[in-house]
Image: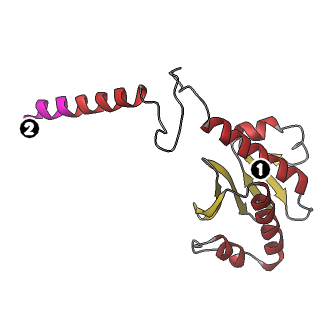
Amino acid sequence: MNKKPKSVDAYIKAAPREAQAKLKHIRKIIKAAAPKATERISYGIPYYDHVGRLAYFMLARAHIGLYLMPPVVAKYRRELAGYATSKSTIRLPLGEKIPVMLVRKLIKASVAHNDARYNEKTCSRGHEFQKSSSQPVCPTCWPGRYRKKLVLRIRGNKAKGV
């Protein structure tokens, strides 16, 4: 897989034949657990988006890496004890069967995590507002940040004699 694939189908097709079935299986599990997720290639690997980052997967020499949000991996740490993990990575060995129920549970937990983050009613500074597609950022914080940048830009130009 030297060239970056343009689609998930191309990514799977470029993989060694013995790994293609497992990659297709992971893809099928993710699509079944998160039917509203959009699928594309990001950083040269399959990526799923559902109101934010949902999951990535990648073929390595001896495993398939499944990349999720760190809170989800931390929440299921006990169930993942039999697999090599890091903050946001789960390594599924190529020589073993894919743990379908576990992967499905992790993807559904990721969907729930993203939905909860999207439906938060307060920003990180505690201002109450309802996130929506038309208002994705806090209206109280954002203008302040924008004004600050604008003032600094104007002050910078005056200092330069512009």
* Residue ID for mark 2: 162
Q: In the picture provided, is 11 more to the left or to the right than 23?
A: left
Residue 20 position, x and y percent, is 79, 74
Q: In the picture provided, is 150 more to the left or to the right than 119?
A: left
Amino acid identity at mark 2: Val
Residue 160 among those drawn in magenta: yes
Real-space Cα separation, disc 2 to disc 1, in angstroms: 53 Å
90 or 9: nearer the viewer: 9
Disc 1 is placed on an element classified as helix
Pointer 2 or 1: first along the chain? 1
Magenta region, residue range: 154-162
- The picture quadrant where one finds residue 140 is top left
At a point 7% along the width and 34% down the height, the residue shown is: 161
Residue 77 position, x and y percent, is 84, 38
Q: In the picture provided, is 61 more to the left or to the right than 161?
A: right
Against 29, is 4 above or below? Answer: below
Q: Residue furthest left?
A: 161
46 or 84: nearer the viewer: 46
Q: Residues within 10 Å of mark 1 (few under 14, many from 20)?
A: many
Against 57, is 84 above or below? Answer: above
Amino acid identity at mark 1: Ile
Quarter of the image containing the N terminus? bottom right
Residue 44 position, x and y percent, is 59, 65
85 or 118: nearer the viewer: 118
* Residue ID for mark 1: 107
The answer to whether marks 2 and 1 mark residues whose Cβ atoms lie closer than 8 Å is no
At a point 33% along the width and 32% down the height, the residue shown is: 146
At a point 71% along the width and 78% down the height, the residue shown is: 13
Q: Main secondary structure of the magenta part?
A: helix
Of marks 2 and 1, the one in the foreground = 1
